[in-house]
Image (tube, grey):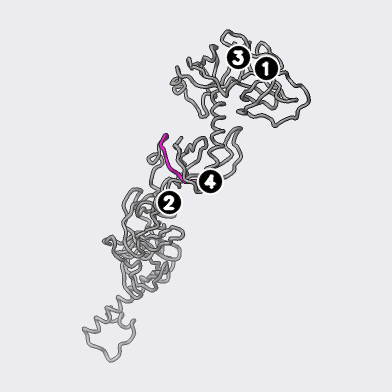
Amino acid sequence: MFEREAPAMGNRKRGKAPRVGDRVEGIVVQVGRDSVFVELDGNRQAFFDALELRAPDGTIAAREGDKVSAHVVEVDDAKGIIRLGRSLGKPGKVAGVNKGGLDVEVGGMRAFCPMSQIDIRRVEDADARALIGQTLRFVVTDIRDGGKNIVVSRRALLQHESSEAAARVMNDIVAGAVLQGTVSSVRDFGAFVDLGGVEGLIPRSEIAYDRSVSISEALKAGDTVTVQVREIKDVEAARPGAPTKKITLSLKALTADPWAELAIVEGRVAQGTVTRDTEFGLFVRLGPGVEGLVHVSELGRGSRPSEGEEMRVIVKKIDRASRKIALVPAPDGAQVGGVVATNAVKIGAIVTGAVERIEQYGIFVQIDGTKGRSGRGLVPNAEIGVPRGTDLRKAFPEGTKVTAKVLETGEGRLRLSIKGAAADEERGDFEAARGKAGAPASLGTFADLLKGRKA
């Protein structure tokens, strides 16, 4: 480490400012009781803590004029301080745990490592106690009172090693690259993966195609995983030494895409499981990684399936480009795999149903044997057949059974008439009565028939 050389004290060019971890050379210019000062160039000085250079007999193994090679272990630009060390870190044995940190034996002397400096990540008291008796490497960060008070840091060493490893690993981290890593932690929003000194995040959406898969069930801290790099972004460091790259990873990108061979067919009945109940409808899982939506407009106001319950649906529309599937509830008795027309009612048909909703402009009726919007029709006020001003909520409370005539069909345009169904019934009665009495010479009017029935 030391070479005898007469110091050349002439003018030298001021080199690049050293950083922690750099290997530097200099000339010893002063040996003190607690520190050994070294000239790095014509304008910069650095120093060793005397503890770094003490021989086994306690003497300082350095003299003025010695040429030295060392690592930079601390740089404080504000104070103009550059601290050197023989190596980046010294072995120290953890002797115990006290309030706030570790007691460490370094070079035959007692040192203190604050709890915040034990590791890069937060260390709990129980974890710290598990280190007792272990020999770890530390960086000396402060020496006071002639070596009586020594403060060391393992975190600083780990951060440097991590930075060096990260610099090497970043050459291989490019979008599309497939890498191996170790799960370092699992959160509600995803899992962090150590790629060898650099961490990336697998977001929840990139764990699996199947959204029902729980992150905590899919991954555990310590798991070895193979991932694909989806994206790399430059970000501002949240704190000094924090990462400046945001790396997004994916597990599902390396698995088969369930949409590539989707066997679901429009118009057919399928069996699924409700995964989410939202304000805009029910999401139904039709298979691993494949979900469809039953829009709220297709659901009645009564009870509906809860999350985890099975539900039989009709596949109304599949949009492969946007990966969306529109579903409607299947009618009672529909068989899985069968084809069911979503709107089987015809104009002019007489149907029965239950009042589902009452509005100012009319009442909505769900036709018996149907589910969803295609079987739900509006009876406008003019087609209800009650006097103006009638309180519809009292006359037709929700659930009331009614008979109506189909006036119009089409997606979202099913119109019904209670008045029309009543007129058809009366006309049918008239025809039946006329058939029994024999055909009159003149049929007269529909009103004449009603008068005759009353007589």
Residue found at x 67% / y 16%: 36
Q: Is residue 54 positioned above or below 416 on the image?
A: above
Dot 3 or dot 2, earlier in sequence: 3
- Front one among 244 and 274: 244
Disc 1 or disc 4, which is closer to the eye? 1
The N terminus, quarter of image: top right
Residue found at x 71% / y 21%: 39
Tell me if label 3 and label 2 are in contact, CB under 8 Å: no
At label 1, which amino acid type do we have? Answer: Arg
Dot 1 or dot 4, earlier in sequence: 1
At label 2, which amino acid type do we have? Answer: Thr
Looking at this view, name the residue that lies furthest to the top.
57
Q: Find residue 408 and report its horizontal and vertical position in percent.
A: 39, 73
Tell me if label 1 and label 2 are in contact, CB under 8 Å: no
At label 4, which amino acid type do we have? Answer: Val
Q: Which residues are magenta?
A: 221-228
Residue 225 forms part of the magenta stretch: yes
Left or right of residue 411: residue 141 = right
Residue with the mark numbered 1: 4
Q: Residues within 10 Å of mark 2 (few under 14, many from 20)?
A: few
Query: In what element is the residue under mark 3?
Result: helix
Residue with the mark numbered 4: 174
Left or right of residue 442: residue 10 = right
Residue 51 - label: 3
Disc 1 or disc 2, which is closer to the eye? 1
Q: Find residue 412 and report its horizontal and vertical position in percent.
A: 42, 67
Looking at this view, name the residue that lies furthest to the left.
436
Residue with the mark numbered 2: 278
Main SS of the magenta part reads strand
Query: In what element is the residue under mark 4?
Result: loop
Dot 4 or dot 2, earlier in sequence: 4
Tell me if label 1 and label 4 are in contact, CB under 8 Å: no
